[in-house]
Amino acid sequence: MRKHWVLPQPAYAHYVCYPEMLGHYSDFPEHAERRSEGFLNSYNLHMVFDGEGYVFQGGERISMKRGSGFLFPPGAYQQYGSDPGQAWDVRWMHFATAIPLPMLEEADQSRGYFFTFDPGTGYDTLFEEMYRLSASYETRSEPRLSTLLYEILVTLMQNSEPLQGSVPLEIRHSIRLTADRIYSECERPWTLESMARLAGYSSYHFLRLFRSIMGKTPNRYLSDCRMARAKLLLASTGQSVADIALLCGFQQSSYFIKVFRQLEGMPPNQYRRSFNS
């Protein structure tokens, strides 16, 4: 199978990112490219969902199989291809963007970024919608195409690791599952030890991993989750501040009011009035 689309330049000139060319190849053993420096003036993203292949970087042949991918920046030398005996199932895209994402900056600096990703994170659904919109292109589809590209890039940022990454994907996945549990049950009397136990790590190891993956400490994340629930209840219900404090994991309403004021710059009742005026 060889699906391939080329999109016209968008009518609106201010999208933060936009696909120029995209495709889906499988059972296509001839898929191989060698592009000289300066030939391609857009980013080139390939994500391998099955099969075997390779990419060359600095004279080194790097294996690319299921759950591997590569991103070349504009103007970079590129050499890659599918294994004729085990052809790739690969989804790829050439795109333009000026978003300062760390992944893009790494590709710019090293002239090629190579990573692992979890194929089960929903990328195929996002790509399929892009393919459908591209196959029946209309100018009114441009905002959605830009949005889908942005979602793919950000999802990849959150759910991928460099090939030589220090945090394997299965660990990243377990930390995110723990974060989701903390969010949905933020009223529980969580401690660092209980959160670490849920994830299956020592407190020290969990703290380091959580900060690295989520960008904040577990206690700060818990506080953010509790504040989000509190603001929702204050804005959408008539429950008392004391009841809301308990529903958000605070045993004393006075402490809840103190924390709320520190984080939001106003007491809970004033926040509620701003939505009920």
Image (cartoon, grey):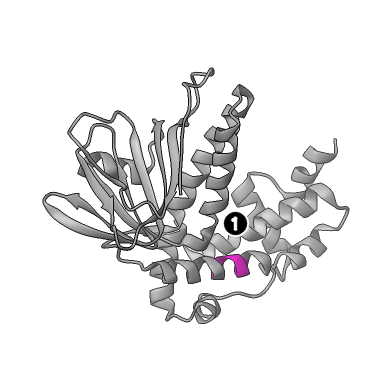
Please name the residue shown 67% across and 66% down the image: 184
Tell me which amino acid carries mark 1.
Asp
Compared to residue 137, the image places residue 147 above or below, namely below
Among the 4 quarters of the image, the one containing residue 78: top left
Q: Can residue 216 be seen in this view?
A: no
Among the 4 quarters of the image, the one containing residue 82: bottom left
Total marks shown come to 1
Compared to residue 22, the image places residue 128 above or below, namely below
Residue at the left extreme, as displayed: 59
Instruction: Where is residue 20? Give x, y as percent.
Output: 43, 30
Main SS of the magenta segment?
A: helix
Instruction: Where is residue 190? Give x, y as percent.
Output: 60, 74
Judge by depth and name the residue closer to the eye, 89 or 180.
89
Judge by depth and name the residue closer to the eye, 171 or 271.
171
Is 179 within the magenta?
Answer: yes
Residue at the spot of label 1: 224
Q: Is residue 156 visible?
A: yes
Instruction: Where is residue 180? Give x, y as percent.
Output: 60, 65
Residue numbers of the magenta segment: 178-182
Residue 152 located left or right of residue 27 = right
Is 134 within the magenta?
Answer: no
Residue at the right extreme, as displayed: 238
Instruction: Where is residue 199? Give x, y as percent.
Output: 50, 77
Q: Residues within 10 Å of mark 1 (few under 14, many from 20)?
A: some
Compared to residue 101, the image places residue 196 above or below, namely below
Among the 4 quarters of the image, the one containing residue 203: bottom left
Residue 41 located left or right of residue 180 = left
Judge by depth and name the residue closer to the eye, 13 or 48.
48
